Image (cartoon, helix red, strand yellow):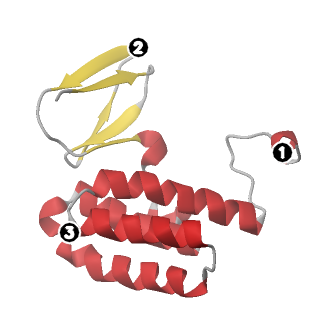
Amino acid sequence: MPLKLSLKPGEKFVLNGAVVQNGDRRGVLVLQNKASVLREKDIMQESEVTTPARRIYFPMMMMYLDEAGAARYYDEFVQRLAEFMGVIGNPQVLAECVAISKHCMEREYYKALMLCRKLIEYEDERLGNVPASLPASNSES
């Protein structure tokens, strides 16, 4: 099944490890076969790995972007996920952790990454972090 990407002007994404940037107009790309694709908003820089959930996301993202070298990042992912699960008591969050692990074991890294976004949101709520994309007034409602 093809993947259709609608891109904003100048939007960057990673396609099989290559950073690609859209031109100055809105664009649409259709990928006809399996490829590792991450939009700019889903790419985490190493300097952003500052919390436990982000320490799970980053090696998982690297496994997705470098599937041939996934084994290099797997142990870090497992360690960080186990540490996170060891301090979480919320059954729903724990179930999401189990699902993330299952997706990784099945090499469904993109699905695992999208679930891990929920862990980051949960963690941000617990730590009182306000995402940069949301104005502070929205978090007070």
Indicate the amino acid at tag 3: Ala
Q: Quadrant of residue 138?
A: top right
Q: Which mark is residue 136?
A: 1
Question: What's the residue at 82%, 47% (across, down)?
Answer: 139
Q: Quadrant of residue 33?
A: top left
| Vertical order, 31 against 103 (above or below) | above
Q: Is residue 14 above or below residue 105?
A: above
Q: Earlier in the sequence, mark 3 or mark 2?
A: 2
2 or 1: mark nearer the eye? 1
Q: Which residue is mark 3?
A: 70
Q: Residue at x 16, y 29 (%)?
A: 1
Q: Judging from the image, what secondary structure is the residue with disc 3 in?
A: loop
Q: Residues within 10 Å of mark 2 (few under 14, many from 20)?
A: few
Q: Earlier in the sequence, mark 3 or mark 1?
A: 3
Residue 67 horizontal/vertical position (percent)? 17, 60
> In the rendering, at what x and y percent does residue 112 appear?
36, 58
Q: Which mark is residue 26?
A: 2
Left or right for 35, reference 124: left
